[in-house]
Image (cartoon, rainbow, N blue to C red):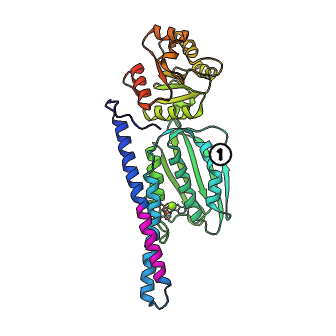
Amino acid sequence: MNAPDRSHAEPDHAAAQAERMEVVGRFAVGIAHDFNNLLAAMLAASDTIAHRGGVDEATREDALQIRSAARRGAALVRHMLGFARETPAVPQRLDAREAANDLVPLLRHLLGRGVRLDLDSGQEPLPVRIDPTAFDQVLLNLAANARDAMPEGGVLTLRCRAKQHGGATFASIEVQDTGSGIAPEVLPHIFDPFFTTRSERGTGLGLATVQEIVHAAGGSVTVESTLGVGTCMRVALRIDAGAVGGVADGTVLLVEDEPVSRRLAEQALSVWGWRVVSAESAEAALDLAASRHFAAVVTDMELPGRSGAALVAELRARPSDAALPAIIVSGHAEATLRRDATVQALLAAGPTTLLLSKPYPLPELRARMTAICGTRG
Ligand SMILES: Nc1ncnc2c1ncn2[C@@H]1O[C@H](COP(=O)(O)OP(=O)(O)OP(=O)(O)O)[C@@H](O)[C@H]1O
Ligand SMILES: [Mg+2]
């Protein structure tokens, strides 16, 4: 993603906050890497002392204590790196079912041979809003805990379903194991930061991280466990209504056939608070627009079959969308774009059409969104 353009002076708290977090994140990552090097030196030195001939038993014990502490420190740093990501978390629309499916090979690797992975993910898409890396981190942490609870092997079931609760629809993602289960007196503490029953190797940050991520995405984590039988951790994330249809204010129709540009624009628009529905062609866009109203359309000019300008004209031909705000993005210079007859007609019709040349700094897109839609976004 392009760096925020500082010359573009617009009061912008969310972006400033995101930028600050990014700086803090980079700083923390830098420290974590240095810290890892220090820990590696401590590990090596304590190891050497512990295994040196002629060292008395008490000294050897002390050296092993140092080594064990350094190990935990290293695990802690790994979690910190997870918290302070090198890029800030970007919530976006993703299909939880698809994202879980995509993670299966990695999960199999994590679980090893002793644990069987059963996937029960149904067919329906489960559109939710969450940072994709954070979503993966949630599943990986839950799977690691399940693995740790089944040292003798067992079965991990990954289940993805749509569930109704209190009038809303949720994506329910369950990670169930046939492991040790959790004792009733331990259960209230498992989400506490640094709470662990794995004294040697655990940091106790796994579930704290999971909870932090899920809460940030507006979801919840619940647990059911029976000692000696197993545990089921359930993550519930609200289904993104804007993505499944209906009238959603503040939804932008993004039309772009080039995947990288599409993803960039999708991410940026979501960060600025818009819901985004994407189409890869003018035809697909028209299909989407047939059944719902969009707050704005951002379209590429050079689409297969029909130009972006022709698409905008067609969308506006319907009385309900006559004033649909539109941004036409093009790989050509703006001057070239202005020579197109359809573009000229759109520009002549009023101030709700703006042009933008690719590649563009993201603040440019944002400024145009604000210009055509008012302060929203
Ligand atoms: N699936 C599970 N089965 C049994 N106990 C669990 C399970 N998941 C979590 N726990 C309990 O909750 C505690 C906290 O889990 P958490 O993931 O936060 O830390 P950890 O696994 O101990 O350490 P780390 O995540 O750093 O490896 C664990 O130590 C364990 O006692
Ligand atoms: Mg854990």
Element type at mark 1? loop
Q: Is residue 218 above or below residue 61?
A: above
Residue 190: tell me if it is visible.
no
Residue 82 pos. (x, y %)? 47, 54
Q: Residue at x 56, y 39 (%)?
A: 94
* Residue 373 occupies quadrant: top left
Residue 253 colored magenta?
Answer: no
In this view, the residue in front, 153 or 365, is 365
Q: Magenta region: which residues?
A: 34-49
> Type of residue at label 1?
Ser
Q: Position of residue 10 (x, y in %)?
A: 32, 29
- Residue at image position (64%, 22%) is 304
Q: Principal SS element in the magenta part?
A: helix
Query: Which of the 4 image quarters holds residue 57?
Result: bottom left
Quadrant of residue 67 within the rendered picture? bottom left
Q: Residue at x 53, y 22 (%)?
A: 332
Q: Which percent across, then down, holds residue 221? A: 49, 50
Up-down relation of residue 72 to residue 96 (above or below):
below
Q: Name the residue carrying label 1.
A: 121
Q: Where does the image place residue 183, in percent across and percent down from the top left?
A: 50, 66
Any part of residue 153 in sight? yes
Whether 43 is among the magenta residues is: yes
Q: Taking 316 as reference, is 192 left or right? A: left
